[in-house]
Structures are given as C-alpha cells and as structure tokens.
Amino acid sequence: MSAQPITRHPLQPSPAVVEAILAIAVLALVLLVYLSTLQIDVSGSHSEYTLDTGEFQMALNLGGTLHPTGYPLYALLGWPFAAAARALGATPAASASLFSLVWSVGTLALVIAMVIQVGGSAWHGAVAALVLSATHSFWVHSVIAEVYSLSLFLTALCLWLALRCARRPSLLPWLGLALGLAIGHHRSAVLMLPALGLFLIASGVFRRLRRSTIALASLALAGSFLVYLYLPWRASQGAPWVYGQPDTWQGFGDIFFAAEYRGLMQLTADPGAIVQNLLAVLQLMAGALTPVLLGLGWLGIVAALAAPRSRWPAAMFALTGLASVAFAVVLPAAVFLPAVLLSATLVTALGVGLALAVLGSWRAWLGALVGLAIAVLAVSTGIQTRPAVVEYSRNRIGREVLNSIKALDESVPPLVAPWGTDYFALAYGKWLTREIADAKLLSPADDLSAALDQDGVLYLPRDQFYTYPPDYWRQRYGPVCLSSAGWRLVSVRRAPCAGDAPASTAPLAMFGDQIALDSLAVTAQPDMRSLVATIGWRALRQPDADYSVGVFLGDGTAIAGPEDVVAQEDHAHPVYGLWPTSQWEPGGTVREDYQLSWPAGRQPALILVRLYHRDPASGAFETLGEYSAPLAPLVR
C-alpha cells in the first residue's frame, strides 16, 4: 500500500502563517507594554539618559533646531508627527515620545525580517526582537524623546537593505540613501561602513551592477545630506527654538562638524585603560542582556559564520557590533555609552535569532523549545527592567517645579536656569503648555543684578545650586538670603533678610532662645503614599551654631526609637542643605519644604520636627529642640 500524502484542512493555517501571527503578536505586546511606560509629561530627570529630552520635546513641538550635529532628519520628521499627535489629543511630551516609539517598533520589525532573510523563521525573529525589547537602553530610548531610536532604526534599515541587495543589486541606491541619512543623523553610523562594504563585495553586488546604478547610489548617499538645509531654513523663518546660529556659515559649520564636542574626541592609548574600558563595556552589555543572552547571541553569530548560507550576513552583523564596541572602548567620552552600544545590542539580538535558526535546522522542535525558553527569559528580564525605565519616563521633578511656580503669588515670577534640564522644563511650561506663560525666563548670563533690583526676588530650581552654590551668589551680587519657595524651588533675595515677625500668632514652638517654629503645614500628594511638609522658621537672634533639620513621620502617638519611624528626611542645613542657620539674621523668616514617602503597610499618624547639631569637641549630637503634632489635622 502506498503512503497517502498528509493534507491540511483548508481552514488550517500553515506553520509559516502561525509563526507570522506570533511575530505580530510579539510586536503588539511590546507596543502595549512600552505605551504603559511612555513619557507623557515634562522631562525633569537629571539622568544622562534624559539630559537632552527636554530640548527634543521643545524642538519637535515648535519646529525648532537642535544641538550639534543638528539632527535635521529627526527634527524635520518629528515636527509634523508631533503636530498630528497633539491634534489627536496627545500632550506635547507624549507626542515627542511617540515619535521615538514608532522607530523602535520599526527596528523590531526589521530584526524579524533580517532573521528570516538569513534562514530563520518568523518565530526565531520574534524571539530576537523580544530580547532586544527587554534591554534597558533600547526600552528607555523608545519611550522618551531622544534621537537614538531613529538612529538604531536607520542602522537596522541599512543592514536589511544590504541583505536585500545581495539578491536584488538594483536596490543599492536605496541603501545609499539610508546610509547617508544614518550618517547625517548620527555620525556613529560611519562605523557600519567596513561591515557593509565587506558584505557587498563578498556577495558580488558590485560585479552585477551597472555603473549608472553605482553612480545613482553615490548620488543618493551624498544627496541625503541636503536634509541639513532644514537648519538654516528654520532659523531664517524665525523658529521659536533654534540652537546656535545655523543660518550663518560659521554657525552652520560648528553644528555640522560638532565643534563644541571636539575636546571629547580623545583616543584611549593606555593598554591598561583599554582593558578597563572593555571590561566596563562587557559588564554594561551583560547587565542589559544577561550573561546568558549575551553569550548565546555571539555563539549564534559564530555558528552562522560556519554555515555557507549565513556566513557573510553573520560577518556583517559581527563587524557592525564589534565596531561599536571598539568605539566605546577607545573613545568612551565621545558619546553616551549605552547609546553607542545599541548597535552591539541589536547585533546580539540578531545573534540569538541566528542561534535559534541553527538549532531549528538540526531539529525543528529544538529551535522552538529553546526559543520558548529564551522568550521566557526575555520577558523575565523585561519585568525587572520596567521599574528602572519608569524612573526616567515618569520622573516628576520637572512637573513638581512647575507646580511650585504656579503656586507663587507673583503674576510674573522671574525664573533663572542655564541651558539644560531645568531650563527645558521651564520652557515647556512657558511655551508648550503655557501654564507659566507669564513667567520671566532668565539665564545666569543675564544681568541678574538688575532683575534683583527690579523684582526683589529670583526663583531657581533647587538643583541649580549644585552648579551655582550660595557662595556664587554672594560673590557676584553681595549678601543674599535663600528660602524655599515651594517643593524643589528656591528664592534668592538681597540682604538684609529680616522679615516681619508674625504679630497676632504665637509661634508653634521655641527652639532655645534663638529660633522659633512659626508654622507647619502638610500637603498630601496624589499618590497617597507621600506628603510635603512646609515649615516656617524665624530667627529671634543670630543663631550661634549651624543646626541640622530632621523631619520624621511616625505611625504611633510618639516617636521613641527608630522602629517608630515610617519616613524621615534630614538636611545638614535648612533650605535643602543650602542655608546654614549661623547666617540667619534676627527677625528673618525662612521657609522649608520636605517630601516624605512611606512604605506600603504602614500609615503615618504623627510628624516630628527637630533641630540638632554635632558638638565639635565631643562629637556627640545635641538637640536644640523638637516639635511633634498629630498628622491628620495638618493635612490639606
């Protein structure tokens, strides 16, 4: 009896269709998870990941230009995208973040396509995409306004087009265009040139091309840099957000060639330093991917190098990843390392897909089983990665500063911040959401002496005092007084600092005969797990020591020991550690703000405020005084 062929029910999908559905499902899952961590409000974090995010939020929403090397493609495409997203109801911040997310999803789709191109299945590619999506740097740059998601997409697009060119050499002009846009967008894309060149030569692409096609590809590569005309055009149009002077030859050249960053281009020549840098890079990548996935990815590339069909694609991937690692090792200060290593992370994820393809070629069930195990590991890695991503994307520093400014009594508050994270946050509130549209935004380079004389006060985000400490203000503007003006906001006034003592209300407590506690108010925060305590002090006479402040929350009727404390905040000096009590003037009033959070399972019922100092002779801590009160009547 002859064997009967196995037939499939007409409605039963083929294995390839099933795998394609799985791949789409993985992309949809990643998209939904990423959306849950998307940055939707003003950026305020001072992390290296988000140092420029506020600038990108402003430029994309205002059709502006950016710091060197200008990123004109990013700005040119992002401007109409952000406008469309806002028209659909997105916030300015979310509009800019969504622009990053689109390119990251595109990168994941290209990962799947490349794994299929070199002999894997859609399932193998989906697992590789899942691995990439779970890594910290890729995830962060997918949900905030940053240029690196577009940069990695262009890298992946060049690799994919190179693979396609091996079969259809006529696509070379498209590769030239993509490569030119990639280099124009971020200069690190030149690191791909050796890998792409080797692959195209080894694949015989140039031998099968007409000279006209090669000339067209060269023209496309060179012509892609015309996108830089966006910079002088927007400057000449009077765009409200322009970096430098891109409408002058000198200014344009400085931006295009990144003149202000030349000092960072210092090669590491010391062998010991090179080894140390290499270990740091490997540790960074292993931390992002886990050692298992990092090792498996590069084992997959090595295995693919041994197979004739995948040898040259694997070589192209390997050279691309190794070039970014080499750059990070010898020029570690030239660019943010987690960003430049994204190419190596992409290649590692591709290597995971290649490893699964090799296993699947031996035994289909083995490739599927190992792929499932890797998918579980990637999901587990992503679960651990998510809280760290949220710390950046949902950081509330910028929002808290804006809220404090909105609570000021002044109609035109003078705000001071240099170019950087705090300035971007203030600009966001002034020009995008217009919640502080009437604020006067100044820079330390401005004539602040005149502003102090005219307005009597300047307001700075608290973190600016790391760069411009109290001594800076005294040296430039003479005696000044500092006080909190709200959570994360500090006021600067000229001395004398004496204010009007409350006439009708007795102080809440006396701390010796030097300092009075005039007021204590508590504001519950929206998360219901934190509060802001606002304290009002008054110097009765010149304090004879520098006292530290401690604010404690307890869940009982008293705080007798550490076990009774559910939250505390200490500052070496009042006003965020900036204003020593020995500099207070008699009659002067000082405000402080403290934010305290408590763990789940405990509920504060009491607040205690303490002034203390350390005796320089004995080293013992001495308490000047303390005040405690039930929390509930104070909360507003």
Image (spheres, rainbow, N blue to C red):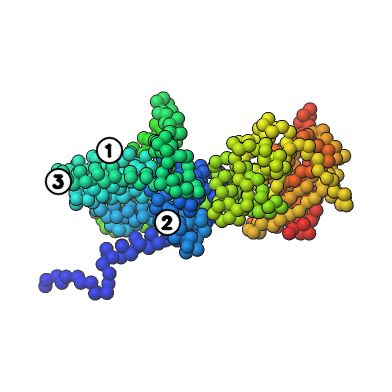
Look at the numbered disc 1 and give the secondary structure of its residue. Answer: helix
> Split into 4 quadrants, where in the image is the C terminus?
bottom right
At 26% from the left and 67% from the top, the residue drawn is: 14
Separation of residues labelled 1 and 3 (CA atoms):
22 Å
Q: Which amino acid does the dot numbered 2 rest on?
A: Pro
**Residue tagged 1:** 194
- Out of 23 and 107, give the one closest to the viewer: 107
Q: Nearer the viewer, mark 2 or mark 1?
A: 2
Q: Is residue 260 visible?
A: yes
- Tell me which label, 2 or 1, sits earlier in the chain: 2
**Residue tagged 3:** 210
Residue 456: x, y in percent?
72, 42
Q: Which amino acid does the dot numbered 3 rest on?
A: Arg
Above or below: residue 555 compared with residue 459: below
Residue 229: x, y in percent?
37, 45
Q: Which amino acid does the dot numbered 1 rest on?
A: Pro
- Tell me which label, 1 or 3, sits earlier in the chain: 1
Disc 2: CA contacts within 10 A as few (<14), some (14-19) or many (>=20): some
Residue 579: x, y in percent?
72, 38
Disc 1: CA contacts within 10 A as few (<14), some (14-19) or many (>=20): some
At 31% from the left and 41% from the top, the residue drawn is: 192
Residue 194: image quadrant is: top left
Separation of residues labelled 2 and 1 (CA atoms):
35 Å
**Residue tagged 2:** 80
Q: Pointers 1 and 3 in contact (CB under 8 A)?
A: no
- Tell me which label, 3 or 2, sits earlier in the chain: 2
Look at the numbered disc 3 and give the secondary structure of its residue. Answer: loop
Look at the numbered disc 2 and give the secondary structure of its residue. Answer: helix
